[in-house]
Image: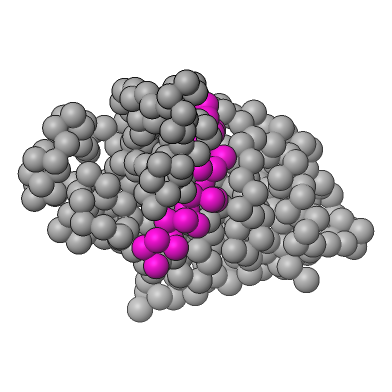
Amino acid sequence: MKKLISLVLCAAMLAALVACSGVRIRPNPAAKISFETFDNGMVSFQMPKGWKVDVGPGESVTNYAFKAYDPQNRDYMFFFCLKLEGFMKTEKARATWEYYYPDQTYAHLAAVDPQTTEAFYGVWAHNGSYANQVYKTDFFPVLDDLTVVDTLGQNLLGGDIVRASFKGSSGNAQGLFTAAVTDVGSYYVTENWNPLSNKVDVAPLNVYHVVMMTAPDDAFNDWAPHLDRCLSTLQFSEAFLEAFHSQEAAMANVVKANAAVYDGMSDMIMDSWEKRSASYDVISQKRSDATLGYERVYDVETGDVYRAYNGFTDEYQGDRYLPVTDDMYTKGIEGYIEH
């Protein structure tokens, strides 16, 4: 009972402080995310409570993929795949496959040219849509109008870490992406039945450790650490590792050490994120504020940043909440100032 009385008094004091400041503040939900453990006997990881997990189509453990997402807004998403394949190195190689074997996957997936992380995600919208069509699913996210806005560094397991914007299901969205595009060899054939034509390398590419962490444009800065927690806690079961080892020995050692590897991978991603350029933050956050009808202010006493309703600075008579400067757009939002 005493504890209950104390809580009531604390709540009353907080309400009095808010009233004295002349503003009503609603805390940012992203500051109080609770997590739960997902474990299906193959993989386990921590994800925000209430999220759903879908496992990718197909039965091969070497291509094991899953995505965790908010069923209320799928732009909040963590996507992981061990290995994707079926991509050509050039459009000429893809056209050659189409000429010889038009029914093969290689003939339909867009080429990854050059063989970089940015190029891989540059054609993801087409390839994701095609894979969904083939498997009769909506598992693969379709990242329309994806544009890489910054390359933040290299990943522990190969490939770059890129920041990109795209058109999500609920509007503008952005995320951190990585993937290791790997050239596993060459195989040359003529471009068509003419033996005098040029030869083209039609050997496929493999893409390993595909990771996407996304959220709506206005929320990503606050959600990046929460999304990264999915990766840092990722582990594969012994049963999974045994099945994996029999299918792809080349990757077995990496996956065997999965707890340390993915924790280190997440550290590298977040370290790169924290060292990012502020220029895109300023642009994207200003854009989302304008779209959603917010102003952004900060508390001069605490330094906390808030989103306020449009017109707040015109109506507010105090000197505690002032408009933010551009360098503050990299900071997370503590809450929302409401009418």
Q: In the image, residue 101 lies at what x, y percent?
A: 38, 45
What is the quadrant of the N terminus in the image? bottom left
Q: Looking at the image, which residue is at 33% across and 46% down? A: 81
Q: Looking at the image, which residue is at 47% across and 21% down? A: 196
Q: Quadrant of residue 301?
A: top right
Which region is colored magenta? 110-136
Q: Quadrant of residue 256?
A: top left
Chief secondary structure of the magenta portion = helix
What is the quadrant of the C terminus in the image? bottom right
Horizontally, residue 225 falls left or right of residue 173, namely left
Q: Does the magenta segment cover residue 132?
A: yes
Horizontally, residue 31 falls left or right of residue 150, namely left
Q: Is residue 107 visible?
A: yes
Q: Looking at the image, which residue is at 61% across and 53% down? A: 144
Picture layout, residue 137 above or below residue 175: below
Q: Does the magenta segment cover residue 42?
A: no
In terms of depth relative to the viewer, which is nearer, 143 or 330?
Answer: 143
In terms of depth relative to the viewer, which is nearer, 165 or 244?
Answer: 244
Q: Looking at the image, which residue is at 37% across and 56% down? A: 67
Picture layout, residue 196 above or below residue 46: above
Horizontally, residue 166 falls left or right of residue 298, namely left
Q: In the image, residue 254 lies at what x, y percent?
A: 21, 31
| Total tally of numbered discs in the picture | 0
In terms of depth relative to the viewer, which is nearer, 313 or 181?
Answer: 181
Q: In the image, residue 199 lies at what x, y percent?
A: 44, 22
Q: Is residue 37 visible?
A: no
Picture layout, residue 80 above or below residue 309: above
